[in-house]
Image (tube, rainbow, N blue to C red):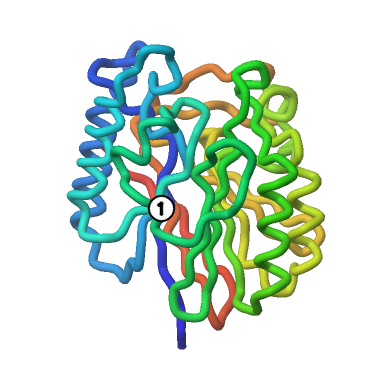
Amino acid sequence: MMNVHFLQISDTHWSRSPIADGIDPGQRMDRLCRWIQSLDAPIDFIVHTGDLVHRGHIEGDDGSSTEQVVSLLRSLPYPVHCVVGNHDHRAAWPRILGSMPGDRLPCYRQRWAYHFQLRNERFFILDGRDDAAIDPRGMLGEAQIESLSSVLASTSEPATVFVHYPPLPLECDWIDRTMLLIDGDELHRVLAKHRNRVRGVFFGHVHRPVALQYEGVLYASTGGVAMHFPNLPMETSATPQSDPIAFANYVCVGDSGTLLKTQWVQW
């Protein structure tokens, strides 16, 4: 079997100090890293689906908080891939992360978007961070979606996609109003054409694990490490919840399809 195993983490929102009452992202991140270090399971890579830091999007951020998180991630015994979130300092990433660990996807502006192959599986890192005017919504843009479509059309491997923002509605008032990819429907139309070999689309941003299968395409999130938000249909706002659980998804893609196991860490 040619399975690939990866660990998805998201929304660490790292900060040097607590960001709300009972919410200390630094402590939670340290606990999560210790848990990952203790795992005795096959892991080919870790993917962080956005919001490495809490204040990287603020004008004047010097990137030092991003450097701290990247240092913690690089202390782990696995390769790490990162997705740009709406709280991240994208301009600092080339200096801190170095060159993209894959083939760049042509996009308008400077997006952190690429694809790479591992065994007989292809993985796409997409960048939905757009103008502050639409934040906290995201947008991939026509060029990025066309690039993804072109690569899928010219390759034959099964494909897995990572993006920060949920592409499709999740039946939650505040999420569906404020958090989606503006062009998520366009992304879905491209993926649905290749549904027989799309393993899944994995995202963050909503801070809770949720899964949706739509027209043969699996969409799944993992919970936020720093904090959690409610996601039931009637919820109208993102009220931070400081329950003592950090989430991760342990995922296997390969001959048996897509197997997802949500994990949690008491800290």
Circle 1 SS class: loop
**In which image quadrant can residue 17 be found?**
top left
Residue 172 versus residue 105: which sits nearer the camera? 105
- Residue 97, above or below 115: above
User: Which quarter of the picture shows residue 176?
Assistant: top right
Percent coordinates x, y for residue 122 in the rendering: 54, 69
Q: Is residue 203 above or below residue 29?
A: below
Residue at 21% across, 42% down? 72
Report crowding for label 1: few under 14, some 14 to 19, many 20 or more residues within 10 A (C-alpha): some
Closest to the observer: 197 or 173?
197
Image quarter (top left, top right, bottom left or bottom right) of the C terminus: top left
- Residue 30, image x and y in percent? 21, 37
Q: Position of residue 184 (x, y in %)?
A: 74, 42
To which residue does mark 1 refer?
A: 100
Say which of 218 and 160 sits in front. 160
Q: Residue at x 36, y 56 (%)?
A: 46
Going by the numbered disc 1, the residue's amino acid type is Met
Relative height, residue 248 to residue 239 (above, below): below
Q: Is residue 74 left or right of residue 215?
A: left
Residue 123 in percent (x, y) is at 53, 63
Q: Residue at x 70, y 43 (%)?
A: 167
Q: Residue at point 47% right, 44% down?
A: 83
**Left or right relative to 202: residue 227:** left
* Count of labels in the image: 1
129 sits to left or right of 181: left
